[in-house]
Image (tube, rainbow, N blue to C red):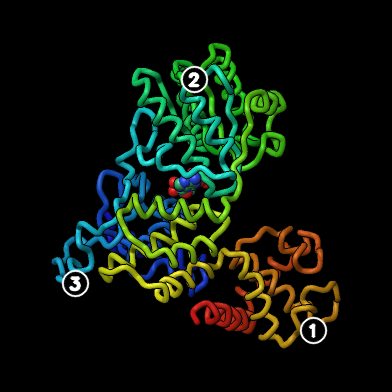
């Protein structure tokens, strides 16, 4: 059996390989593994900001690594400022966190085992704006007329815009109004995994039976069943079974049914047969209202200047908006005071410049251009001049590595090139990074530039 330290070291080692140095330090400095018991691992992180990122951006990867080492482990949880087990409590550990100031953090234990619903999501905690008005109204109306108005209800919209929140709020509200209605929330990934498992164990009939007894079936991120024929097949049967008896089905996806590739026609037409509502990007007022509500929920005061600053700078993702606020709250908890505007700006600089943000495209291009002494405009042109080919390939490589942009997106940015050109460039530089010491050094130096600009 490995000690906690050894186990976490294994994770760190592997994560270090897959991230840039600056990135690795940002997300993993000051983390440790607190406990490991009955399949659940608890990791201590320095603040809410890191917690959010480890959960959302690296959660899957960390889980995979840990399970490679110890397949018994089923879940990894994160907690802010936990105290390393086996070590005496330090005075400073306690001073950092006064209990009444610790953010109300909803744990996985708040999830109801029979419905998979988390109480934290409710209609009360959902801010309605023009971006989500229709989706909200349709969800609400379902809770009053289960199976009778829109069936199925299909919500779609980009990442972090509130789909899961609305689905869960719908489930919670129905459970509360009618405690004997059978409600189930499931992600389509879980659904697929369950189906595979049931097929293997020959319990698929039981599974279908279980689903057919539901009054409300909620499937989140249904786009992931694309291309999975067996799952689609079984889901189709279940769908029809429920639908024919006026049982409610609610689905979410990152795009409309017509845009989900490899979705069987019969399912697509079922999805389109009810009500489709989209969730868009919230406007400034809505973003501000969300921030105000979250402050209230967390019982933490942030001055209005700071809130407008966050609301005007983070626009496209409510999860990020919340993450930025959490960062400010974490600061408040650590220093036991509300940060002033200047401190807020500083705290958010790192957030706004996270490597995943599109604005860093420009920064990467500038760093590459500075480093090789070629103008950015040349990187963007189609020219095949020899002295530009390599810098451009490096730019493509870094855009991919540091921003996770898609190959076609990078291609269209750099002179309208085909995605296969970008893949070729990416693979070439990746290979060189491994085999050629000078390319490796060049990349390190360019990355240093990129991150220096972040820090200043
Ligand atoms: P999605 O499922 O679309 O990726 P989520 O539902 O997980 O997004 O939302 C991300 C975060 O933003 C959640 O913490 C959620 O509570 C919050 N959120 C999203 N929309 C709203 C809203 N309109 N009002 C309050 N909180 C919201
Ligand atoms: Mg979601």
Residue where numbered disc 1 is placed: 387
Q: SS at mark 2?
A: loop
Sequence-wise first label, 3 or 2? 3
Residue lying at 42% horizontally and 63% vertically, measured from the top left: 304
Q: From the image, state whether disc 1 or disc 2 is nearer to you.
A: 2
Crowd band around label 2 with a 10 angstrom C-alpha radius: few (<14), some (14–19), many (20+): some
Residue lying at 32% horizontally and 66% vertically, measured from the top left: 46
**Could you tell me residue 302's position as x and y percent?**
37, 63
**Could you tell me residue 294's position as x and y percent?**
39, 52
Mark 3 → mark 1, Cα distance in angstroms:
55 Å
Residue 6 falls in image quadrant: bottom left
Q: From the image, state whether disc 3 or disc 2 is nearer to you.
A: 2
Tag count in the figure? 3
Residue where numbered disc 2 is placed: 146
Of residues 377 and 429, the one drawn nearer to the viewer in this rendering:
377
Q: Are marks 3 and 1 in contact (CB under 8 Å)?
A: no
Mark 1 → mark 2, Cα distance in angstroms:
65 Å
Sequence-wise first label, 1 or 2? 2
From what the image shows, is residue 386 above or below residue 194?
below
């Amino acid at each position: 059996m490995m000690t906690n330290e050894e186990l976490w070291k294994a994770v760190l080692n592997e994560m270090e390989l897959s991230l840039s140095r600056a990135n690795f330090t940002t997300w993993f400095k000051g983390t440790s593994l607190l406990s490991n018991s009955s399949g659940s691992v608890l990791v201590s992180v320095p603040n809410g900001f890191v917690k959010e990122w480890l959960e959302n951006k690296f959660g899957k990867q960390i889980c995979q690594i840990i399970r490679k080492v110890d397949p018994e482990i089923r879940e990894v949880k994160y907690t802010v400022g936990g105290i390393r087990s086996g070590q005496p409590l330090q005075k400073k550990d306690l001073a950092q966190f006064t209990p009444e100031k610790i953010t109300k953090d909803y744990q996985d234990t708040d999830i109801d085992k029979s419905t998979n619903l988390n109480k934290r999501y409710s209609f009360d905690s959902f801010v309605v704006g023009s971006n989500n008005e229709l989706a909200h109204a349709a969800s609400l109306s379902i809770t009053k007329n289960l199976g009778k108005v829109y069936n199925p209800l299909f919500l779609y919209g980009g990442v972090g815009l509130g789909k899961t929140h609305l689905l869960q709020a719908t489930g919670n509200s129905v459970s509360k109004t009618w405690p004997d209605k059978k409600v189930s929330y499931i992600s389509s990934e879980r659904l697929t995994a369950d189906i595979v498992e049931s097929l293997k164990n020959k319990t698929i009939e039981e599974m279908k039976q279980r689903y057919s007894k539901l009054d409300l079936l909620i499937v989140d991120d249904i786009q992931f069943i694309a291309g999975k024929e067996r799952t689609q097949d079984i889901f189709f049967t279940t769908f029809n079974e429920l639908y024919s008896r006026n049982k409610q089905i609610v689905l979410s996806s990152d795009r409309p049914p017509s845009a989900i590739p490899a979705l069987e026609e019969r399912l697509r037409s079922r999805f389109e047969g009810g009500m489709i509502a989209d969730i868009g990007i919230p406007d400034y007022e809505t973003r501000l209202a969300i921030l105000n509500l979250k402050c209230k929920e967390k019982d933490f005061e942030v001055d209005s200047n700071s809130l407008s600053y966050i609301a005007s700078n983070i626009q496209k993702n409510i999860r990020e908006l919340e993450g930025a606020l959490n960062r400010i709250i974490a600061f408040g908890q650590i220093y036991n005071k509300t940060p002033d505007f200047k401190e807020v700006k500083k705290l958010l600089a790192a957030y706004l410049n996270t490597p995943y943000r599109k604005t860093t495209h420009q920064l990467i291009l500038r760093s590459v251009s500075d480093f090789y002494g070629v103008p950015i405009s040349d990187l963007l042109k189609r020219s095949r001049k020899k002295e530009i080919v390599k810098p451009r390939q490096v730019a493509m490589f870094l855009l991919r590595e540091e921003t996770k942009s898609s190959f076609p997106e990078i291609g269209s940015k750099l002179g309208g090139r085909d995605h296969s050109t970008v893949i070729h460039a990416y693979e070439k530089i990746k290979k060189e990074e491994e085999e050629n010491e000078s390319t490796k050094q060049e990349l390190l130096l360019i990355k240093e530039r990129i991150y220096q600009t972040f820090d200043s």
